[in-house]
Image: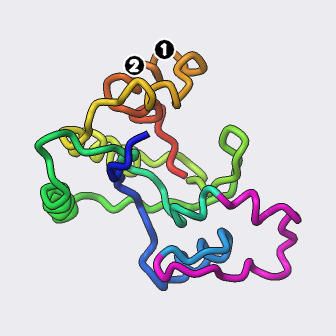
Amino acid sequence: MTNLPRYAIYFAAEPGSALDRFGAELLGYDVHRGIDVAFPAGIGLPPDWREMTHDPRKYGFHATLKPPMMLTPGKTESELIAACASFAGTPRAIPAIKPVIDSIDGFVAIVPSVPSSELENLAADCVREFDSFRAPLTEQDRARRSPSKLTPRQRCYLDRWGYPYVFDEFRFH
Protein backbone atom coordinates (compact mmCIF):
# COMPACT_ATOMS: atom_id res chain seq x y z
CA MET A 1 0.00 0.00 0.00
CA THR A 2 1.31 3.41 -0.91
CA ASN A 3 1.33 6.51 1.24
CA LEU A 4 0.38 8.74 -1.67
CA PRO A 5 -2.78 10.77 -1.09
CA ARG A 6 -6.02 9.73 -2.69
CA TYR A 7 -8.60 12.16 -3.98
CA ALA A 8 -12.34 11.83 -4.56
CA ILE A 9 -15.22 14.08 -5.46
CA TYR A 10 -18.04 13.84 -2.97
CA PHE A 11 -21.38 15.45 -2.40
CA ALA A 12 -21.25 16.79 1.15
CA ALA A 13 -23.72 18.95 2.99
CA GLU A 14 -22.80 22.53 3.78
CA PRO A 15 -20.78 22.51 7.03
CA GLY A 16 -23.05 23.37 9.95
CA SER A 17 -26.27 22.84 7.96
CA ALA A 18 -29.10 20.72 9.32
CA LEU A 19 -28.14 17.87 6.95
CA ASP A 20 -24.49 18.10 8.00
CA ARG A 21 -25.42 18.00 11.71
CA PHE A 22 -27.79 15.07 11.07
CA GLY A 23 -25.03 13.09 9.32
CA ALA A 24 -22.46 13.89 11.99
CA GLU A 25 -24.81 12.71 14.74
CA LEU A 26 -25.62 9.49 12.88
CA LEU A 27 -21.91 8.76 12.45
CA GLY A 28 -20.93 10.05 15.88
CA TYR A 29 -18.25 12.25 14.35
CA ASP A 30 -18.10 15.78 12.94
CA VAL A 31 -15.54 15.53 10.15
CA HIS A 32 -15.38 19.32 9.66
CA ARG A 33 -14.44 20.00 13.28
CA GLY A 34 -12.58 16.71 13.80
CA ILE A 35 -14.48 15.80 16.97
CA ASP A 36 -16.71 13.02 18.24
CA VAL A 37 -20.35 13.99 18.72
CA ALA A 38 -23.16 12.26 20.56
CA PHE A 39 -25.43 9.92 18.67
CA PRO A 40 -29.04 11.12 18.49
CA ALA A 41 -31.03 10.16 21.56
CA GLY A 42 -34.29 8.28 21.51
CA ILE A 43 -34.17 6.72 18.05
CA GLY A 44 -33.32 3.18 19.09
CA LEU A 45 -29.86 2.70 17.62
CA PRO A 46 -28.50 -0.83 18.03
CA PRO A 47 -25.92 -1.39 20.79
CA ASP A 48 -23.13 -1.96 18.23
CA TRP A 49 -23.86 1.29 16.33
CA ARG A 50 -20.46 2.82 17.21
CA GLU A 51 -18.74 -0.23 15.76
CA MET A 52 -21.03 -0.25 12.71
CA THR A 53 -20.16 3.38 11.92
CA HIS A 54 -16.41 3.03 12.50
CA ASP A 55 -15.37 2.94 8.82
CA PRO A 56 -17.83 5.57 7.49
CA ARG A 57 -16.85 7.92 10.32
CA LYS A 58 -13.40 8.58 8.82
CA TYR A 59 -14.95 9.84 5.56
CA GLY A 60 -17.79 11.83 7.07
CA PHE A 61 -21.35 12.04 5.83
CA HIS A 62 -21.02 12.14 2.04
CA ALA A 63 -21.97 10.58 -1.28
CA THR A 64 -19.34 9.66 -3.86
CA LEU A 65 -19.48 11.23 -7.31
CA LYS A 66 -15.91 10.44 -8.50
CA PRO A 67 -14.47 7.48 -6.59
CA PRO A 68 -11.18 7.77 -4.70
CA MET A 69 -8.10 7.82 -6.90
CA MET A 70 -4.41 8.55 -6.80
CA LEU A 71 -3.19 11.27 -9.15
CA THR A 72 -1.59 10.15 -12.35
CA PRO A 73 2.06 11.15 -12.78
CA GLY A 74 2.33 14.67 -14.11
CA LYS A 75 -0.91 15.90 -12.55
CA THR A 76 -0.92 17.97 -9.38
CA GLU A 77 -3.35 18.64 -6.57
CA SER A 78 -3.53 22.31 -7.55
CA GLU A 79 -4.51 21.31 -11.10
CA LEU A 80 -7.23 19.03 -9.73
CA ILE A 81 -8.54 21.81 -7.49
CA ALA A 82 -8.61 24.22 -10.45
CA ALA A 83 -10.48 21.62 -12.55
CA CYS A 84 -12.99 21.16 -9.70
CA ALA A 85 -13.57 24.90 -9.51
CA SER A 86 -14.10 25.07 -13.26
CA PHE A 87 -16.48 22.09 -13.18
CA ALA A 88 -18.43 23.60 -10.28
CA GLY A 89 -18.76 26.86 -12.21
CA THR A 90 -20.40 25.18 -15.20
CA PRO A 91 -24.15 25.80 -15.19
CA ARG A 92 -26.19 22.58 -14.85
CA ALA A 93 -29.41 21.33 -13.33
CA ILE A 94 -29.10 20.91 -9.58
CA PRO A 95 -30.36 17.44 -8.68
CA ALA A 96 -33.00 17.33 -5.98
CA ILE A 97 -34.00 14.05 -4.38
CA LYS A 98 -36.44 12.80 -1.80
CA PRO A 99 -34.18 10.73 0.47
CA VAL A 100 -35.13 7.41 2.04
CA ILE A 101 -33.21 4.96 4.18
CA ASP A 102 -32.48 1.63 2.49
CA SER A 103 -29.97 -1.20 2.47
CA ILE A 104 -27.37 -1.52 -0.28
CA ASP A 105 -25.52 -4.83 -0.29
CA GLY A 106 -25.77 -5.18 3.48
CA PHE A 107 -25.14 -1.62 4.62
CA VAL A 108 -27.63 1.05 5.55
CA ALA A 109 -27.63 4.13 3.35
CA ILE A 110 -29.66 7.18 2.50
CA VAL A 111 -30.67 6.92 -1.16
CA PRO A 112 -33.05 8.68 -3.55
CA SER A 113 -36.60 7.36 -3.29
CA VAL A 114 -36.79 7.37 -7.10
CA PRO A 115 -34.00 7.47 -9.71
CA SER A 116 -32.79 10.93 -10.68
CA SER A 117 -31.42 11.33 -14.20
CA GLU A 118 -29.92 14.72 -13.23
CA LEU A 119 -28.02 13.10 -10.36
CA GLU A 120 -26.90 10.16 -12.51
CA ASN A 121 -25.72 12.59 -15.21
CA LEU A 122 -23.79 14.66 -12.65
CA ALA A 123 -22.01 11.57 -11.35
CA ALA A 124 -21.24 10.35 -14.90
CA ASP A 125 -19.91 13.81 -15.80
CA CYS A 126 -17.63 13.71 -12.73
CA VAL A 127 -16.31 10.27 -13.65
CA ARG A 128 -15.51 11.35 -17.22
CA GLU A 129 -14.32 14.88 -16.49
CA PHE A 130 -11.79 13.95 -13.82
CA ASP A 131 -10.58 10.64 -15.21
CA SER A 132 -7.50 12.27 -16.75
CA PHE A 133 -6.35 12.89 -13.16
CA ARG A 134 -6.69 9.21 -12.14
CA ALA A 135 -3.60 7.04 -11.98
CA PRO A 136 -4.09 3.53 -13.35
CA LEU A 137 -5.12 0.96 -10.75
CA THR A 138 -2.32 -1.08 -9.29
CA GLU A 139 -2.81 -4.86 -9.25
CA GLN A 140 -3.25 -4.58 -5.47
CA ASP A 141 -5.98 -1.93 -5.86
CA ARG A 142 -7.74 -4.01 -8.50
CA ALA A 143 -7.59 -7.15 -6.36
CA ARG A 144 -9.05 -5.24 -3.40
CA ARG A 145 -12.24 -4.79 -5.44
CA SER A 146 -12.65 -8.61 -5.70
CA PRO A 147 -13.13 -8.65 -9.48
CA SER A 148 -14.21 -12.30 -9.44
CA LYS A 149 -17.34 -11.22 -7.52
CA LEU A 150 -18.22 -8.48 -10.02
CA THR A 151 -20.38 -8.78 -13.10
CA PRO A 152 -18.60 -8.61 -16.48
CA ARG A 153 -19.82 -5.01 -16.93
CA GLN A 154 -18.55 -4.04 -13.46
CA ARG A 155 -15.14 -5.58 -14.23
CA CYS A 156 -15.06 -3.60 -17.46
CA TYR A 157 -15.82 -0.40 -15.55
CA LEU A 158 -13.20 -1.26 -12.95
CA ASP A 159 -10.55 -1.70 -15.62
CA ARG A 160 -11.58 1.35 -17.67
CA TRP A 161 -12.64 3.83 -14.95
CA GLY A 162 -10.95 2.49 -11.80
CA TYR A 163 -14.23 1.66 -10.06
CA PRO A 164 -16.98 -0.87 -10.80
CA TYR A 165 -19.99 1.23 -9.76
CA VAL A 166 -20.13 4.01 -12.34
CA PHE A 167 -22.67 4.99 -15.01
CA ASP A 168 -25.53 2.47 -15.06
CA GLU A 169 -24.03 0.73 -11.99
CA PHE A 170 -23.91 3.99 -9.99
CA ARG A 171 -26.00 4.17 -6.81
CA PHE A 172 -26.08 7.52 -5.06
CA HIS A 173 -25.80 6.90 -1.33
Q: Is residue 166 magenta?
A: no
Q: Amino acid at mark 1?
A: Pro
- Work out whether residue 99 can be spotted: yes
Q: Is residue 36 part of the magenta span, yes or no?
A: yes
- At x 39% / y 50%, what residue is drawn? 65
Residue at (67% x, 74% y) in the render? 28
Gap in angstroms between the C-alphas marked 2 and 1: 6 Å
Q: Is 133 on the left-hand or right-hand side of 114? A: left
Q: Around disc 2, counting alpha carbons within 10 Å, would you say few (fewer than 14), some (14 to 19), or many (20 or more)?
A: some
Relative vertical location of residue 35 with respect to residue 156 in this rendering, above or below: below
Coordinates of residue 73 in the picture (x, y in percent): 16, 40
Q: Kindly indicate the quadrant of the structure image that contains residue 85.
A: bottom left
Up the image or down, 163 lies above or below 20; here it is: above
Of residues 113 and 151, the one drawn nearer to the viewer in this rendering: 151
Kindly state the secondary structure of the residue where label 1 is placed. helix
> Which quadrant is the N terminus positioned in?
top left
Residue 90 makes an appearance in the image:
no
Residue that numbered label 2 is attached to: 156
Q: Report the side of 92 relative to 108 (left or right).
A: left
Location of residue 57 by image quarter:
bottom right
Q: Which mark is residue 152?
A: 1
Dot 2: what SS?
A: helix
Q: Nearer the viewer, residue 132 or 19?
A: 132
Question: Viewed as shown, does residue 100 lie left or right of 77?
Answer: right
Provide the major secondary structure of the magenta segment. loop
What stretch of residues is rendered in magenta?
32-54
Q: Residue at x 47, y 38 (%)?
A: 170
Evaluate if marks 2 and 1 touch, with contact meaning CB atoms under 8 Å apart. yes
Query: Can you give x and y, in whole percent of width and height, for residue 160 in the image?
Result: 31, 24
The correct choice, above or below, for 120 with respect to 31 in the image is: above
Q: How many numbered markers are drawn?
A: 2
> How is the model colour-coded?
rainbow
